[in-house]
Amino acid sequence: MSKKSSQKYHDDYYPPKKSERGVAPADIVRELDPLVDYALEEGRKTGLRHAIMEVMLVSYLMGMGFDYDTAYMIVESWEVNERFPGEYDYRY
């Protein structure tokens, strides 16, 4: 495939400093990085499925405008015996 084709090559691509909504991708990664670390640690104790669900719920609430600490506390309040309502006990 020649360089003149419409396909972008990695050396032709420069990620935007900000998205159309004014949010830099690096800022999003930095904001969510603690959640990834938490999921890895939590997954060792409660199983990956539960840890991923917990992090997704926290992320959703953060997207709704809650700060991390508040979102985390809300999600923790939903847990009963390390499970969310309707969650099965998968251990992987």
Image: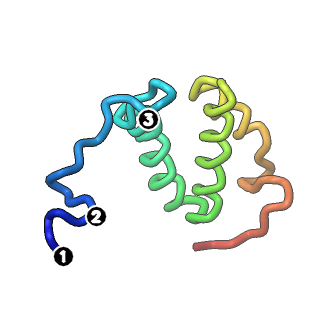
Q: Secondary structure at mark 2?
A: loop
In the rendered structure, the answer to whether residue 51 lies left or right of residue 22 reads right
Identify the residue under disc 2.
7
Asked if the residues shown at circle 1 and circle 3 are in contact, with their CB atoms under 8 angstroms apart, the answer is: no
Classify 10 Å Cα crowding around label 3: few (below 14), some (14-19), many (20 and above): few
Identify the residue under disc 1.
1
Query: 12 or 60, which is in the foreground?
Result: 12
The C terminus sits in image quarter: bottom right
The N terminus sits in image quarter: bottom left
> Vertical placement of 45 versus 68: above or below?
below
Asked if the residues shown at circle 1 and circle 2 are in contact, with their CB atoms under 8 angstroms apart, the answer is: yes
The type of residue carrying mark 1 is: Met
Q: Secondary structure at mark 1?
A: loop
In the rendered structure, the answer to whether residue 50 lies left or right of residue 83 reads left
- The spot of residue 37 in percent (x, y) is 42, 47
Residue displayed at 56% across by 64% down: 48
Q: Earlier in the sequence, mark 1 or mark 2?
A: 1
